[in-house]
Amino acid sequence: MLRGNDFVQGNKKLILAYLWQLMRFNLLQLLKNLRYHHSRGKEITDVDILKWANNKVKSAGRVSRIESFKDKNLSNGIFFLELLSSVEPRVVNWNLVTKGESDDEKRLNAIYIISVARKLGCSIFLLPEDIMEVNQKMILVLTASIMYWSLQQPSEEPDRCESCVDDSSLHRAASEISIDDTTSEKAPSDWEDGSLTASFISNIASDDAISETSEIENGSSTTTTIP
């Protein structure tokens, strides 16, 4: 079992496994809640989340639009700031927003996005680099988290999607999100078909192995399991 001393000693492998479990649990809860609030129990897809985000920004009188969760235009952060502003008009201070043209400006916008989303109460697991580099998986999770927060608000009238198919895409993506030194990694080829949600959690059970790590210390093998 993970012990407090593992944190004190900075046991990187066990700490990452612990963080993965927190992230996975949060994602599963997010999916469950989105199905309940958005589609009356039907499965929700990445297409539904993308459509909701674009419609929300458009309804606020903004012109930004993204084609997918790997749209390179997301790197400047403007779309997410407009999305956050559309779900809570007073939350974004536009005097703090840059044009997002240089890397420094993109980073400032990305940091501000994370700050604003956390202020609203969204669950955030990504870093500024994930936005700047358009980490497809983390971008989807961020959008879904903003969507869920918005749907919880009393004034929110969710657009019901009659064509919701299956969320096996979201299921597989959760199992593929790896927490490592680089945080932002290139999306694998199976993400290229745009069926992000269908790939998000379908193999999540097999990823329980991430919560089990083996270390060999002083010639003896020690296996630690994160519940």
Image: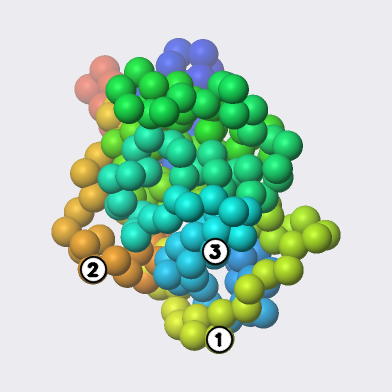
The crowding category of the residue bearing disc 1, from other C-alpha atoms within 10 Å (few below 14, some 14 to 19, many at least 20), is: few
What's the image's color scheme? rainbow
| Residue placed most toward the observer, 99 or 10 | 99
- Inspect this view and state whether residue 205 appears: no
Looking at the image, tell me whether mark 1 or mark 3 is earlier in sequence order. Answer: 3
Which residue appears at 46% of the width and 39% of the height? 78
**Given the image, on which type of amino acid does mark 1 rest?**
Glu
The crowding category of the residue bearing disc 2, from other C-alpha atoms within 10 Å (few below 14, some 14 to 19, many at least 20), is: few
Residue pointed to by mark 1: 162
User: CA–CA distance between discs 1 and 3?
Assistant: 16 Å
Q: Provide residue 129's location: percent of width, then percent of height.
A: 35, 30
Quadrant housing residue 121: top right
Label of residue 193 in the image: 2
| Residue placed most toward the observer, 171 or 116 | 116
**Position above or below: 8 against 55:** above
Label of residue 55 in the image: 3
**Given the image, on which type of amino acid does mark 2 rest?**
Asp
**Position above or below: 208 against 205:** above
Which residue appears at 43% of the width and 66% of the height? 46
Q: Provide residue 196's location: percent of width, then percent of height.
A: 35, 64
Name the residue furthest bottom.
162
